[in-house]
Image: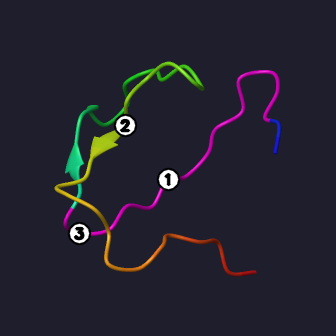
Amino acid sequence: GLIRFGSRVDVFLPSTATPRVAVGQTAVGGETILAEFGGIAATPLVRVS
């Protein structure tokens, strides 16, 4: 989706992810690395609606 006008968004990561940002840090979509994952995930990460 598209988030405009400085809206906020919640990001949920698996417990095995290593965060690369700090709480409250400004992130730029498509530029800021939010987290790193050690290796290849056993199951694909998908959104379930």
Which residue range is magenta in the image?
Answer: 3-16
Mark identifier at residue 34: 2
Left or right, 48 with respect to 17, comes to right
Q: Residue at 78% across / 35% down in the picture? A: 3
Q: Are marks 2 and 1 in contact (CB under 8 Å)?
A: yes
Secondary structure, mark 1, is loop
Going from N to C along the chain, the mark reached first, 3 or 2, is 3
Q: Quadrant of residue 39?
A: bottom left
Could you say where residue 6 lies in the image, as x and y percent from the top left?
Answer: 71, 23
Mark identifier at residue 11: 1
| Label 2 to label 1: alpha-carbon separation | 9 Å
Left or right, 30 with respect to 11, comes to right
Most common SS among magenta residues:
loop
- Say which of marks 2 and 1 sits in front: 2
Left or right, 29 with respect to 44, comes to right
| Label 3 to label 2: alpha-carbon separation | 14 Å
The residue identified by callout 3 is 15
- The 10 Å Cα crowd at callout 3, few under 14, some 14 to 19, many 20 or more, is few
Q: Residue at 31% across / 37% down in the picture? A: 23
Secondary structure, mark 3, is loop
